[in-house]
Amino acid sequence: MRTAVVTGASSGIGREFVRQLGYFYKDLDEIWVIARRAERLEALKKESRVPVRIFEGDLLKKQVYKEYHRSLKDLCPDVRMLVNSAGFGKSGSFINIAGEGKKLQTDMVDLNCRALTRMTQMTIPWMGKGGRIINLASAAAFCPQNGFAVYAATKAYVLSFSRALGSELKSCGIYVTAVCPGPVDTEFFSVSGELTNPLKKLTLASAPGVVRKALSDSRKKRSVSVYGAGMKAARLGAKFIPHSLILKAEELFTK
């Protein structure tokens, strides 16, 4: 059974991956979707070109992993693609966010890093030559971000992990792509906080465009997918401009 697996599939970029995967893979038998909001996943079934199998659950808790692992063992799928899209961010100073809830920032680390790593570890044994892994990182991964300290750090982990894993798996014929968009027009900002930075507003991208580029780059075996000229320039700048200067510039924008 040829399968794709998508986490964070109930909204935003994850949902868009499910919508587009049927065009990317013409011979998929099922798409397995993992998210907390079952009613949204049920609605997604009607939008997908491929039959959808739902795993309702919170990736910060054990139960959904048990159900997923049981299905892997029982059905022995040929996983053609794993998309790790689940994650969230919260903008603001580290101290202020800590005041909003003791677990908010550690949950960010657990979902953005630990859950992604765990899903990857569980899924790779069911992948073969030609398999693809797409991990949702962010342009925030390119350098530290004032006012987005924990989120940017988690995405730096995703980018570094993805590139190293891709190097390790290349000999097996499995290719890993880290997707590094800038701000995307999704529900992300209802959790992270309203997008106020004028430069980020100018580079706001659409989820369909980001996903289309990610799937194209994955097909081309690219290790990193960056959407838009603005984010490509940001990546280049982060390579050559000292991060201390970037942080000073960010301080000016957040005052």
Image (tube, rainbow, N blue to C red):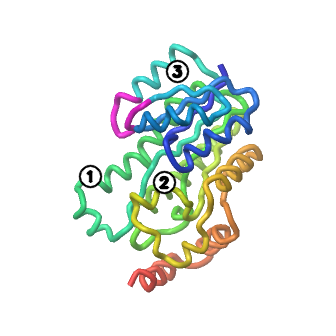
Q: Residues within 10 Å of mark 1 (few under 14, many from 20)?
A: few
Say which amino acid is labelled 2.
Tyr
Q: Is residue 127 visible?
A: no
Seen from this angle, which residue lies furthest top? 74
Name the residue that disc number 2 marks. 157
Q: Which residues are magenta?
A: 56-64
Q: At 44% across and 35% down in the image, what residue appears?
A: 39
Disc 1 and disc 2 in contact, CB within 8 angstroms = no
The earlier-in-sequence mark between 1 and 2 is 1
Q: Where residue 9 sits in the image (x, y, percent)? A: 52, 40
Amino acid type at circle 1 is: Lys
Whole-Å distance between the Cαs marked 1 and 2?
A: 19 Å
For discs 1 and 2, the disc positioned in front in the rendered view: 1
126 sits to left or right of 245: right
Q: Report if residue 195 lies within the magenta region.
A: no
Q: Give how far apart the Cα atoms at labels 1 and 3 are.
A: 31 Å
Magenta region's main secondary structure?
Answer: loop
Report the residue marked by disc 3: 72
* Callout 2 crowding tier (Cα within 10 Å): few <14, some 14–19, many ≥20: some
Where residue 232 appears, as percent x and y from the top left, is: 67, 68
The residue that label 1 is drawn on is 103
